[in-house]
Image (spheres, coloured by chain):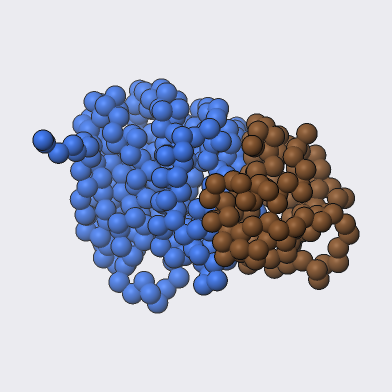
Chain colours: A blue, B brown
Amino acid sequence: MSPTYEPVTGRYLHLDVLGASHRIYVEEAGQGTPLLCLHTAGADTRQWRGVLNDPEVLDRFRVIAFDMPWHGKSSPPAGWHDTDYRLSSRDYLDVVLAVSSALDLDRPIVTGCSIGGRIVLHLALEHPDAVGAVIGLQAGAHVEPYYDTQWLHRPDVHGGEVCAAVVSGLIGPDAPAEARWETLWHYMQSGPGVFKGDLWFYGVDGDLRPRLHEIDTARCPVFLLTGEYDYSCTPADSHAVAAAVAGAQVEIMPGLGHFPMSEDYERFRAHFLTTLDRAAAARR
Amino acid sequence: MATPVEHLVERSVNTPRLAHRGRFLTTTWLLAVGADEYRIRIDDGVVTSVDRGTYAPDTFEFSLRAPAADWALFWSADPPAGSHDLFALLKRGALEVEGNLQPFMANLQYIKDLLATLRETSP
């Protein structure tokens, strides 16, 4: 009996970025227009398993997803044990651009979720000619912190368990149990303090509200997809982005939450495929 | 009508895996549904008593307080977005969590699941 493999291949990319040597885990499948996928805070590329296995996507798109440094199978840089991980807007942009450049991607469509949805707005603002279009999932310009993130990384609370418990309610209530718990497993596996460090970008450093109006969708088309049950980046937050960015298109996805591509791919895919078509047609 | 809070005693035992999830939690905490206060005792993940009354802050470890209307939404059979999770209530300012938060955060999924057993559709 022959083994059953997915069409996805995984490799390690060596990259000098952020002043250090990094070993970055990259997954890829399909052929065609490059589609670069960015995971959420405290998670990894496994969130994109639905897209990476979707024949209708792979027929037309070269799908690439990578684990950010410190995440998934991308190790933290040497000396990590003497530092506190904290993601800044600048560092996040530098990593995404460095990976795209290293893989020689020509004006990729970049999609990202949550922090990934935020950074694609930064890309559209600061590097509109480096990307063909952006699709922000659960993308808002800012979130007011509503709990103390210190709880995510301290010795008297299990980091994996608390990170998963914090985000568990962000998943749509009707998500299939298997996908729900797979999504939470990713959070349970995140390295100590990594989710907390990502949230520094999400809640503090990455506030885009003052500059949203500068995004030029004639140079970089912007599409937004947001799940109804997300209380971190709410539908209202994405509507606020669309209202501030002339030409941005927004769609609210009923029944879905903060991790649409991972928590319920079947429900997500109709919205995503339609938007992907629009992004490909609008790609600059 | 939401299930009475007192039913937490049997729900904590009869809901599969729930007591296991909370097996390292032993605490006394306060649930406030509007002006109604319930002091809840948990031993090794099992709710052993629920007492309605008025309690001084030094008689419980932590408290969860929300208006009765918000708990009613949370405990409805099909909670609307924004009322479907404790942190959704927290995000929109309906829920206040005070006191020693360590047992609450260390057992967050357990507390979420325990309170969700009072939903109208729960067995």
Q: Height in image: A277 above or below B79? A: above
Lateral position of residue A94 relative to residue B89, left or right:
left
Q: Is residue A246 visible?
A: no
Residue shown at 21%/54% (left/top)?
A12
Residue shown at 64%/37% (left/top)?
B122
Q: Position of residue A58 (x, y in %)?
A: 25, 29
Q: Height in image: A70 above or below A2? A: below
Q: Position of residue A235 (x, y in %)?
A: 59, 34
Quarter containing the N terminus of chain A: top left
Q: Is residue B16 visible?
A: yes
Q: Give the residue at the far left of this rendering.
A: A1
Q: Height in image: A90 above or below A273? A: below
Q: Height in image: B19 above or below A78? A: above
| Quarter holding residue A182 | top left
Residue shown at 79%/59% (left/top)?
B39
Q: Nearer the viewer, residue A35 or B12?
A: B12
